[in-house]
Image (cartoon, helix red, strand yellow):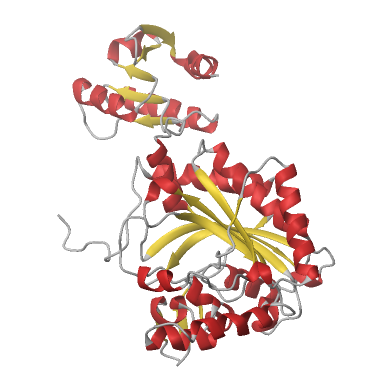
Amino acid sequence: MSTFKAPKGTYDLIPPDSAKYLAVREAIAAPLRNSGYGYIETPGFESVELFARGVGESTDIVTKEMYAFETKGGDRLALRPEGTASVLRAALEANLHKAGNLPVKLWYSGSYYRYERPQKGRYRHFSQVGAEAIGAEDPALDAELIILADQAYRSLGLSDFRILLNSLGDKECRPVYRDALQDFLRGLDLDEDTLRRAEINPLRVLDDKRESVQKQLTGAPLLRDYLCDACKAYHEEVRELISAAGVAFEDDPKLVRGLDYYTRTTFEFVHDGLGSQSAVGGGGRYDGLSEMIGGPALPSVGWALGVDRTVLALEAEGVELGLPATTSVFAVPLGEEARRVLFAKVTELRKNGVAADFSYGDKGLKAAMKAANRSGARYALVLGERDLAEGVVQLKEMESGEQTAVGINEIVAELESRLG
């Protein structure tokens, strides 16, 4: 056994379970690729200041959960705790917004890092697939992203998830609500840290999960009652477009989410089979983020869906993904000449798109056939000295045990025909 173990709060993806994660990533990405979103990949670490400005200095992510460090050159960097700020930074740095085709539509997949108390569904290293539409203020974009996420989840066979929807207003109406909420919070019995947070960003207090805080929030003013006419009209159009697409959602006037950059549309995907860590993904509009990190005004919207929690949601619903077999054909050579001939056939099968594996090492027939069984292959190719002399290979169907002699030079075509 190795002396080393994965760090606390992290995990290794290993076969066969890793195939589920790949399938989930592919399912989430598929509708995005089909809707004009191009793939982007950013570094695993960025300037601490990028997240302090964008995510928000008062958020738990920045104050408690970021893995921050100083390089030998004195730069302050952090492992990325979320994807949006990094993607927007990369888009601005590459001047994608100046190419004349807004919105810039991007999708990404990768690992993210937060120092949290590990529990099921909450890890210090986790995987997300995300999408961002940068540079356009349009309710149809907000609706598109919600619809695409819903489409992705349903393509996986998930059904017991809910979409929560809210509007956080904009720079016109949110300050009025902010003042009203602060007045309310100042009258509560809150600890010093929470009171300090209420002065910096009172909406973050609404997102506090502690029961002692939530009990006191009964009767708190709701943002929907303070929305300006423009925000009300925008939100109503988002709701109408989602409804017209047949996507069910729930209005949640208390939905805030944990990042400071959100404006107007905000949404969350929750799954009731996951216990306390019920959120499987979410996102919203962030019209001011570009300016926060030194760019021009670029109204934008996006989301991130958790791969880890989506896998847990699939397990909670008992959904079995139809994963393709990793191996269709397993070759078993008996003798050196058979080994040379069969290895060439395996190489040819692979070139023709057939998933094929080989009995490596000096295994005898019994051990090699056990390996063929464990591989999940539909067919085994067995080649011995007598077969070589006759110019044939034994093609064995693993499930039925039926065995047929096929000419060595015909075996590739035969297998392609059988496997379709």
Q: Quarter-wise, where is residue 293 in the image?
A: bottom right
Relative height, residue 268 to residue 205 (above, below) = above
Looking at this view, is 414 or 7 the one in front? 7
- Residue 42's spot in the image, x, y percent? 56, 68
Relative height, residue 172 to residue 419 (above, below) = below
Residue 141 visible somewhere in the drawing: yes
- Residue 79's spot in the image, x, y percent? 44, 74
Q: Quarter-wise, where is residue 193 in the image?
A: bottom left
Q: Quarter-wise, where is residue 103 in the image?
A: bottom right
Looking at this view, is 372 or 91 the one in front? 91
Q: Quadrant of the C terminus?
A: top right
Relative height, residue 151 to residue 234 (above, below) = above
Residue 337 visible somewhere in the drawing: no
**Residue at figure coordinates x 76%, y 78% from the top left:** 297
Looking at this view, is 67 or 410 the one in front? 67
Q: Is residue 180 left or right of residue 160?
A: right
**Residue at figure coordinates x 47%, y 83% from the top left:** 77
- Residue 223's spot in the image, x, y percent? 63, 71
Q: Is residue 328 left or right of residue 171?
A: left
- Residue 325's spot in the image, x, y percent? 42, 30
**Residue at figure coordinates x 72%, y 42% from the top left:** 245
